Image (cartoon, helix red, strand yellow):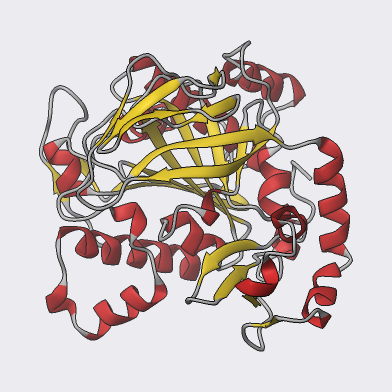
Amino acid sequence: MQSSLVKKNSRTIESVQRVIGHVKGEFKGPTVVFFGGVHGNEPAGVVALQRVFSALKNTSSPCFGEFFGIAGNLPALEKEIRFLDEDLNRIWFPHRLESLHRDSSVQNAETGEMLALYQCIKDILATASPPFYFIDIHTTSGETEPFIVVNDSLLNRKFTSSYPLPVILGIEEYLTGAMLSYINELGYVAFGYESGKHKDPEAITNAENFIWYTLGLTGFYPLDAKGIDKAKAKLDVSNITSKRFYEIYHQYLIKEGAYFKMLPGFENFQIVPKGQAIAVNGKGTILTRKKRQLFMPLYQKKGREGFYFIRSVPKFFLWVSKYLRMLGADTLLVALPGIKWASSKKEAILVDRRIARFFAKSIFHLLGYRTRQAGKNLFILKNRERSSRTWEYENTPWQ
């Protein structure tokens, strides 16, 4: 695995190499991979991983499987900025990886980091044993309680439901090129954890508690029922936001070069009334048209996602969705006019947008399909159920 060095920075993290730490247990078990610092102004995950690996050196408890801690954007971490040339968590497209393999001379700072991380992931998948878990630790620019962001597959849903945290579905419909989306498409459990606000010491503590609970939940660091409950209680730090599934249904995307400023005082998950001024752009003040629940308001200079709106997902909807997907009901979609498989792999469908307007988006979501625009008159809707390596997670401690 490639290993670069970040210089010591007394305000954030100590010296860190690409591989923050690696523990191979005495017995066979899962492979748990944590990433920290994919955004350079978010060092909490790196610090938390350093603490956990340090603690593991002093424990006599047996471990099962392997545990990796991987540092993300090393040059950006050194400079304490989100990225240097482009967002490392927005460029994970197969065609970009292929082009970089053909011609590495076109690299910038972030594409070089992507190739290094890709090699780490490739090496882990080649040498370690399933089941694999990939978790990316982040922090936010605004005030927030900890939460999980996950691509909408049944495997991801099942695993993340074990956490006493809000879980956000549907991010892949709005945020493209994320590293975990790339890993998800390989079929593995992969999701993001937001531990708190940038530079808040609590964000480090939250991340550390999250890592320990995950190691126990997966069986890498076995805990009895009492130990699991104790670790879980440390994660349950909020009495405000319900520990349930939410869905993103709107994104305010900042156009390249456009002016945008979030008005002060808004927090993640905050419910704002109709007619509330929430931000300012080049045309004036942005007001809510209805009562909204705000998600990830942007309070930093870099980034194009101004804010999102979310809503809670009823348990009945989740139940219906689960059984429709298990029954393969999506095969009925391609019998409808204007809808066909995108390829013989049947992992995506092409939808004529002139036809799609007659279908409620929630129908596609029920079956696990999330929208991508492929052309003027076509949508491509991707589904991760067919690629999920569900059999590798059978008989795991959390099932």
Q: Residue furthest top?
A: 239
Q: Position of residue 42 (x, y in %)?
A: 30, 34
Side (left or right) of 337 relative to 166: right
Question: Which quarter of the image is occupied by the C terminus?
Answer: top right
Residue 14 visible at all: yes
* Residue 274, image quadrant: top right
| Residue 95: image location, x then y, percent | 37, 78
Q: Nearer the viewer, residue 210 or 363?
A: 363
Residue drawn at x 61%, y 21% as measured from the top left: 231
Res 222 visible: no
In terms of depth relative to the viewer, which is nearer, 387 or 377? 377
* Residue 53 position (above or below residue 185): above
* As drawn, 204 above or below 161: above
Q: Quadrant of residue 201?
A: top left
- At 45% from the left edge and 53% from the top edge, which residue is drawn? 175
> Which quarter of the figure is the N terminus placed in?
bottom left
Residue at (80% x, 74% y) in the render: 333
Number of numbered labels in the structure image: 0
| Image x and y of residue 70, in percent | 35, 48
Query: Percent x, y for residue 172?
Result: 53, 55
Name the quadrant containing residue 227. Answer: top right
Question: Taking 338 as reference, is 267 above or below it?
Answer: above
**Residue shown at the point (40%, 61%) measured from the top left:** 177
Q: Is residue 95 left or right of residue 283?
A: right
